[in-house]
C-alpha cells in the first residue's frame, strides 16, 4: 500500500516480544543462562521445562518485575531492562499477566478485581466501567458470582477471573504463568479452550510457561523446551517429537 | 546528654536480635548478627527511599488513604479507649496511695493529668496500635507478597509503594495523634472515676485542679511526637510485610517481627523524643 504510514509498517514488523542473550542469577544460582526468544503477532509460544528451571522468572523479567543481569528484552520494540518506572508502566499497560495462583486481590470482590486496572488507567464513568467488567467476566464464563470474594470461588474460577483482569486493558501481549497448574484435567482443558478462543478472537502474542505438555500442544503454535537455564530445543510439537535428545524424549513421554 | 553513636548501634542491634529471635552466643554469631543487622538497615533505607519517591510523586492515592485511615481508626479506637481507661484507673489508684503517704493527696488530679498527657497516653497508644495495626499490616502485606498479589499490582502498572505502602504509613502518622487524644480523654475521666470511688470529688474540680498548671508545651509536643511513632509503625510493618518470603511461615514471621520491632523502636525513639522535648519545650 503506497500511502501506508511508515511507523505503522515498522510497528507491524517489530515482534511484540523479543528476548536476546538473557541472563539472570539469584546469588550463586544461575537461573537463566543466555535465553533467546521471539514471539510474533498472533502467535502463541509455550515455554516448557521442569519445575524450578526459571520459567516464571523469564515471564517476570519480560514485564519488568525483575531486572536481568545482562541481555535484552524488547516489548513492542521498547527495551524494558533499563526503562524508568513511569515508561515501564506504559509498557505494562499493553501486557496482560495471568499469575500461577491467579493472584486475585483478597480484599476485593471478583467484580472489583477486574475493575481495578480499569479504575486506575481508564477514564470510564462508573456505569461504563461496570458494563465493561460484566462483559469481560461474561467472556470468560464468570458472569455469575461477581460479588463473591476470591476465597469463596474455586481455583479454576479464580484463573478465569485472573484472565478477565489480565484482559481488562485490552493488551496485545499476554503472559501466562502455569495457567493449568493445580487444576483437575477437565477444568485444565476448559482453561486451554478458553485461551484458544481468546487467541482466535484477539490475535494477541502470548507466552505460556507450563510443564503440561498436552495443554501446550493444544494451545500453542511453537514450543520451547528449557534446561539448565537455556533453550534446549524450539519448534512445533512435531519438531520436538522428531528430536532424539534423551531429555526431550523423556519430557514428551513423561518417563 | 549526648547519645554515643556506637551505643545506639549496639542498642539497635540488640533490639534486632531480640526481634528475630536470635541468641548471639559465640563471637562469630555476634558478627553474623551485626552483618544481618546492617543488611536489614540498608534494605530499610532503600525501602524508605522508594517510599519517599512514591509518596511525593502524583497522582496521589487519596481514596485508598481515606480507606486505610478509616480502617485503622475504627479498629484501634475501642482498644485505645480501653487501654486509656485502664491506665487512668491504675495510675490513680497507685499514685493516690503514694501521695497519701507523703501528705500530698491534693496533687492527685495534677499528677494523673500530667502523667497521662505527657507520657502514658502517647506511649500506651503507640504500643496498643503497634500490636493491633503493625501485626495487621505486616500480615496483610506479607500475604499479598507471598501470593504474588503485590507482583500482580505492579504488573498492572500500579506502584505498590504508592498504593499499599505510602497510604498505610500516612494513615498511621495522622491517626496516632488522634488516637492519643482518645487515650488521654478516657485515662483522665477514668482517673476521676477511680478517685471518686475512694473519695467523691466533682469532675469539674478534678479537671480544674488537674489542668491548672498545664500549658500547651506540656500537651502539644508529647501528643505530636506520636506522629513519629506512627511513622515507625507504618514503615516497619510495611517493610516487614513487603519483604516476606516463603509461604505461610513468611507471613507469620512478617506479622510477629512487625509487632516486636515496631514496639521496640517506639520505646527507643521515645527515649530520644522525651529528651528533645525537655530540651526544646521545658
Image (spheres, coloured by chain):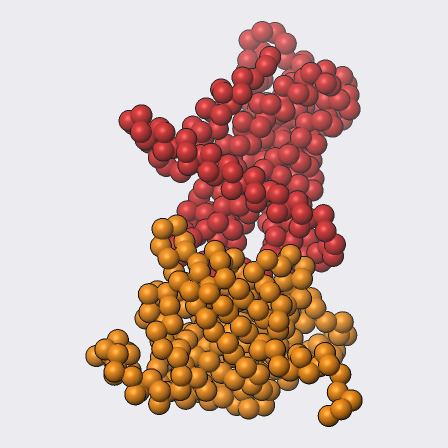
Q: Residue furthest left?
A: A255
Residue in the image at 54% along x and 40% along y: B44
Along the line of sight, which residue is nearer the eye, A248 or B160?
Answer: A248
Residue in the image at 63% along x and 24% along y: B273
- Relative vertical location of residue A145 with respect to residue A86 in this rendering, above or below: below
Task: Describe residue A32's horizontal placement relative to residue B281 as left or right.
Answer: left
Q: Residue furthest front?
A: A2
Quadrant for the N terminus of chain B in the image: top right
Residue in the image at 66% along x and 50% along y: B54
Query: Residue A84 falls in which quadrant of the image?
Result: bottom right
State which chain is coloured red. Answer: B
Instruction: Give residue B241's position: percent from left, percent from top.
Output: 50, 49
Residue in the image at 68% along x and 21% along y: B277
Residue B41 in view in this figure: yes
Task: Describe residue A145's horizontal placement relative to residue A11 as left or right.
Answer: left
Instruction: Give residue A245's position: percent from left, percent from top.
Output: 26, 79
- Relative vertical location of residue B102 with respect to residue A99 in this rendering, above or below: above
Instruction: Give residue A69's position: percent from left, percent from top.
Output: 47, 56
Instruction: Give residue B31's position: percent from left, percent from top.
Output: 36, 29
Along the line of sight, which residue is nearer the eye, A31 or A132?
Answer: A31
The colour with which the image depicts chain A is orange
Query: Residue B211 falls in which quadrant of the image?
Result: top right
Q: Residue furthest top?
A: B102
Residue B81 in view in this figure: no
Task: Describe residue A228's horizontal placement relative to residue B155 as left or right.
Answer: left
Along the line of sight, which residue is nearer the eye, B33 or B198?
Answer: B33
- Relative vertical location of residue B257 with respect to residue A197 in this rendering, above or below: above
Along the line of sight, which residue is nearer the eye, B157 or B232?
Answer: B157
Amino acid at each position: 500500500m503506497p500511502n501506508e504510514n511508515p511507523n505503522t509498517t515498522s510497528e507491524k514488523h517489530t515482534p511484540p516480544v523479543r528476548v536476546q542473550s538473557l541472563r539472570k542469577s539469584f546469588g550463586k544460582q544461575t537461573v537463566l543462562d543466555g535465553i533467546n526468544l521471539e514471539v510474533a503477532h498472533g502467535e502463541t509460544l509455550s515455554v516448557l521445562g521442569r519445575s524450578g528451571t526459571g520459567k516464571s522468572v523469564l515471564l517476570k523479567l519480560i514485564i519488568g518485575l525483575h531486572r536481568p543481569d545482562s541481555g535484552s528484552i524488547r516489548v513492542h520494540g521498547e527495551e524494558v531492562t533499563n526503562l524508568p518506572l513511569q515508561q515501564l508502566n506504559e509498557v505494562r499497560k499493553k501486557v496482560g499477566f495471568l499469575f500461577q495462583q491467579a493472584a486475585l486481590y483478597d480484599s476485593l470482590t471478583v467484580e472489583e478485581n477486574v475493575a481495578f486496572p480499569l479504575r486506575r488507567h481508564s477514564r470510564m464513568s462508573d456505569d461504563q466501567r461496570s458494563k465493561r467488567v460484566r462483559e469481560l467476566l461474561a467472556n470468560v464464563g464468570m458472569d455469575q458470582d461477581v460479588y463473591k470474594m476470591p476465597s469463596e470461588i474455586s481455583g479454576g474460577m479464580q484463573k478465569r477471573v485472573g484472565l478477565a483482569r489480565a484482559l481488562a486493558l485490552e493488551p496485545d501481549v499476554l503472559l501466562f504463568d502455569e495457567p493449568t497448574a493445580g487444576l483437575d484435567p477437565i477444568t485444565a482443558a476448559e482453561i486451554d479452550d478458553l485461551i484458544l478462543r481468546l487467541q482466535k478472537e484477539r490475535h494477541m502474542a502470548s507466552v505460556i510457561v507450563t510443564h503440561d505438555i498436552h495443554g501446550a500442544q493444544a494451545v500453542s503454535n511453537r514450543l520451547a523446551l528449557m534446561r539448565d537455564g537455556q533453550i534446549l530445543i524450539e519448534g512445533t510439537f512435531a519438531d520436538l517429537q522428531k528430536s532424539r535428545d534423551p531429555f526431550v524424549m523423556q519430557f514428551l513421554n513423561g518417563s | 546528654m549526648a547519645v554515643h553513636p556506637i551505643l545506639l548501634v549496639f542498642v539497635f542491634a540488640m533490639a534486632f536480635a531480640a526481634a528475630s529471635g536470635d541468641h548471639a552466643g559465640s563471637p562469630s554469631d555476634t558478627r553474623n548478627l551485626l552483618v544481618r543487622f546492617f543488611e536489614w538497615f540498608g534494605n530499610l533505607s532503600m525501602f524508605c527511599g522508594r517510599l519517599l519517591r512514591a509518596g511525593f510523586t502524583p497522582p496521589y492515592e487519596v481514596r485508598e488513604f481515606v480507606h486505610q485511615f478509616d480502617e485503622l481508626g475504627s479498629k484501634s479506637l475501642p482498644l485505645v479507649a480501653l487501654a486509656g481507661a485502664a491506665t487512668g484507673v491504675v495510675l490513680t489508684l497507685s499514685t493516690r496511695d503514694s501521695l497519701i503517704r507523703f501528705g500530698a493527696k491534693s496533687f492527685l488530679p495534677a499528677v494523673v493529668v500530667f502523667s497521662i498527657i505527657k507520657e502514658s497516653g502517647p506511649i500506651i497508644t503507640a504500643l496498643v496500635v503497634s500490636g493491633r495495626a503493625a501485626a495487621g499490616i505486616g500480615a496483610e502485606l506479607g500475604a499479598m507478597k507471598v501470593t504474588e498479589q503485590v507482583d500482580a499490582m505492579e504488573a498492572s502498572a500500579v506502584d505498590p509503594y504508592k498504593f499499599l505502602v505510602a497510604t498505610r504509613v500516612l494513615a498511621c502518622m495522622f491517626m496516632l495523634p488522634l488516637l492519643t487524644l482518645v487515650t488521654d480523654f478516657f485515662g483522665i475521666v477514668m482517673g476521676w472515676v477511680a478517685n471518686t470511688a475512694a473519695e467523691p470529688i466533682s469532675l469539674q474540680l478534678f479537671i480544674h485542679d488537674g489542668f491548672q498548671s498545664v500549658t500547651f508545651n506540656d500537651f502539644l509536643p508529647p501528643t505530636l511526637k506520636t506522629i513519629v511513632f506512627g511513622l515507625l509503625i507504618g514503615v516497619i510493618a510495611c517493610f516487614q510485610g513487603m519483604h516476606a518470603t516463603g509461604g505461610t511461615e513468611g507471613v507469620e514471621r512478617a506479622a510477629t517481627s512487625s509487632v516486636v520491632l515496631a514496639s521496640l523502636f517506639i520505646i527507643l525513639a521515645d527515649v530520644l523524643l522525651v529528651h528533645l522535648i525537655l530540651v526544646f519545650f521545658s
